[in-house]
Image (spheres, rainbow, N blue to C red):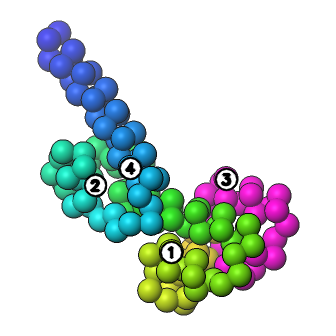
Amino acid sequence: MGDMVADNQKLVEHDECIRDVQQYIHQHVSEPLNREVLAAFAGFSVPHLHRIFTANIGESVPSYVRRVRMERAGRKLRMGAVDITEVALAAGYASHAAFAKAFKQQFGLSPRDFRQLDCRSASQLLREGKHP
């Protein structure tokens, strides 16, 4: 019985920690967010953060960071950002080509095609977060 209570307490603490890590990611999305930085923030080793983050969120830390950055980039494009290269650099990509490839993998459209969507369709795609 005592072990079950201790295990449940750890799960609650891990849930809170993962929420804090997610909030940190959203607040620092423009900064370098590697696993070491996030593990240090959480107070865990990199492998332990990976295990509990993936178990709680269903995707790895790098995948989550990439998705958050892509969704932010999509919002910028939807709001009329003119220079795709600037959006790419802000999302952490070194080139327009690398960003365009990752964007298409995430949303199923190139950034240029995404910008041509009406606001409702673009917003829906961003809410869904992932191309089927």
Give the CA distance from mark 4 to mark 1.
Answer: 17 Å
**Would you say 50 lies left or right of 26 here?**
left
Residue at coordinates 22% horizontally, 61% vertically from top-left? Answer: 36
- Give the percent coordinates (x, y) of residue 79: 73, 67
Q: Position of residue 49 (x, y in %)?
A: 24, 49
* Real-space CA distance between mark 2 and mark 3, rounded to the nearest whole angstrom: 25 Å
The local crowd at label 3, few if under 14, some if 14 to 19, many if 20 or more residues have their Cα within 10 Å, is few
Is residue 26 shown left or right of residue 49? right
Front of the two marks 2 and 3: 2
Pick the residue in front: 75 or 1: 75
- Residue 113 image offset from top left, x and y in percent: 75, 80
Per the rendered image, the range of residues in magenta is: 108-132
Q: Which residue is mark 3?
A: 127
First in residue order: circle 3 vs circle 1: 1
Q: Which residue is mark 1?
A: 90
> From the viewer's perspective, is residue 34 above or below residue 90?
above
Is disc 4 in contact with disc 1, using a CB cutoff of under 8 Å? no
Residue at the location (67% across, 79% down)? 111
For marks 4 and 1, the one nearer the N-term is 4
Q: CA distance from mark 3 to mark 4?
A: 20 Å
Which one is in front, 83 or 94? Answer: 83
Please, what secondary structure does the residue beneath circle 1 have? helix
Residue denoted by label 2:
38
| Mark 2 residue element | helix
Between the residue at mark 4 and the residue at mark 2, the CA separation in whole angstroms equals: 8 Å
Nearest to the eye among marks 3 and 4: give it: 4
> Label 4: which residue?
24
Left or right relative to 108: residue 45: left
